[in-house]
Image (cartoon, grey):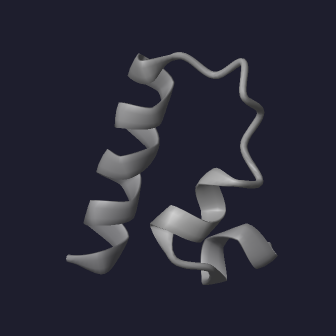
Amino acid sequence: MIAHTLRPVESIHFLPVELNAETLRAAFEKVERFAG
């Protein structure tokens, strides 16, 4: 998916505004795992 190729900050724009902070944390954790 295109969202995965984009940087974390840019991918946030694709996410719904309704997402909770917990969901964002989970998303960032996944990004860190892929980046790591």
| In the depicted structure, whether residue 22 falls above or below residue 9 | above
Instruction: Say which residue appears at 38% left-offset and 53% top-offset.
Output: 30
Q: What is the quadrant of the C terminus in the image?
A: bottom left
Relative image position of residue 22 (x, y in whole percent): 40, 19
> Toward the viewer: 7 or 5?
7
Q: In the visual, does 25 lie left or right of 12?
A: left
Instruction: Say which residue appears at 27% left-offset and 63% top-offset.
Output: 32
Residue 19 quadrant: top right
| In the depicted structure, whether residue 23 falls above or below residue 25 | above
Relative image position of residue 33 (x, y in whole percent): 28, 63
Relative image position of residue 28 (x, y in whole percent): 37, 49
Farthest bottom residue in view: 5
Q: What is the quadrant of the N terminus in the image?
A: bottom right
| In the depicted structure, whether residue 11 falls above or below residue 29 | below
> Toward the viewer: 35 or 8?
8
Instruction: Say which residue appears at 48% left-offset and 65% top-offset.
Output: 8
| In the depicted structure, whether residue 13 falls above or below residue 35 | above
Instruction: Say which residue appears at 51% left-offset and 77% top-offset.
Output: 7
Q: In the visual, does 19 lie left or right of 15?
A: left
Q: In the visual, does 27 lie left or right of 3?
A: left
Q: In this figure, what is the number of numbered marks?
A: 0
Relative image position of residue 3 (x, y in whole percent): 72, 69
> Toward the viewer: 12 or 25?
12
